[in-house]
Image (cartoon, grey):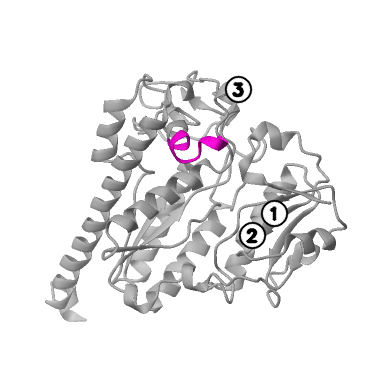
Amino acid sequence: MTDFFHYDDLTWPEVADLPRDIPLVLPLGSGYDFERVAAQLGHPQRLGILPSFPFGWRGSGLAVAEPLLAAYIRNLLDSLRDDGFTRVYALMPQGIDLGLGESALRQTSEVSKTSEVSPRDPERGKVIIIPIGHTEQHGFHLPLSVDTIIIEAIAQGTANQVPEQAYTLPVMPYGVSTHRPSFAATMNAGGRAFEDFWLGVIDVLSARGFDRFYFMSGHGGNMSFLVNIVKYAGERHRRIFCATAFLHTAGKIGSAALDKYRTSPLGGMGHACELETAYLLHLRPDLCHMERVVDEMDFVSTPDYYMDWIEGGSLIANPPWDDDSKTGAYGAGSHATAEKGRLWLEAAIAEKVGHVAEIHEQHRRREERRNAGYGLWGKK
């Protein structure tokens, strides 16, 4: 009998301790029979299931060009290989060929998620929220799924508050990490593959008449690439409004809430910190191991380069993660409480609701100018 476990429920030391010949499976979509998967793999004693990749292939409800999807998936599998795992697989529906060779497993899915993935025609005119988390280490006390759990809650909370203004896609649990060698378990879609895939998503949705998009990220490593995406998208599709923002809980509403409720000093909020730990204590306390928390605030700080949730200073850099952390954490997780997490989630949702309204206003006012023949638009 095979013991199945969720890879993203683990902490990085637990992943580091896994035998490197244990099979790990990344499903495209849901509804698979994992007992059959175990049989395909020779009934291993244990089998790890990675977070489901939500869409991108034919039949998923939101398909991009297969080379774009293949590059994204291949990079994720290579992340696991880089960590020493020798049996890594992508599980996909029958009829899909991404050129993965022996790393591809195929099975008929029993559940279609098409209706949950792709916005339908009546959703045109709404802001399409695109939440992207990540699967990466978060110190000794938090699971790999932190960024995904948090941004999914914020995106869904926003869409629930203003359903007439916004629609959210399923959360993507895989982003970009450029610090993989430091600690085990962190995955990486690759910057170029990430950009190409998400531009492909905007291409598909724009062709269907959707014209307002908001990329919400729960992971700092995604941000520079998301900036590139919105720049490319805005030039490629000149009648859309595509935006992103630096992480979450970081604008006017979020930053005020952080200042009001935090008890850690500057440097206490960075990664697996007071903020992220509080969110998880509120949203998924079952995945928190507070007895293992280690506060780390020994970041090599200078006036224009330091670590806190709302980064300041004029310098941008990316030194090795293990220069500044012995455990994978930046910040003071011990200061976190579930009540702080609840209050910060409320603030983050309120902030994003405001952003949705601004995106609508930006699109409306710009369309009014275009339609009135403003400047060069009058010569087209």
Looking at numbered disc 3 in the image, what kind of residue is underneath it? Lys
Q: Is residue 38 visible?
A: yes
* Residue identifier under label 3: 326
Up/down of 362 relative to 221, above or below: below
To which quarter of the image does residue 265 belong? Answer: top left
Nearer-the-camera pick, 4 or 197:
4
CB contact under 8 Å: marks 1 and 2: yes
Q: Which residue is drawn at 63% across and 62% down?
A: 71
Mark sitting earlier along the chain (2/3): 2
Secondary structure found at label 1: helix
The amino acid type found where label 1 is placed reads: Leu
Density class for disc 2 (Cα within 10 Å; few <14, some 14-19, many ≥20) is: many
Q: How far apart are marks 2 and 3 (CA)?
A: 30 Å
Query: x%, y% of residue 146?
Result: 51, 41
Q: To which residue does mark 2 refer?
A: 73
| Range of magenta residues | 279-287
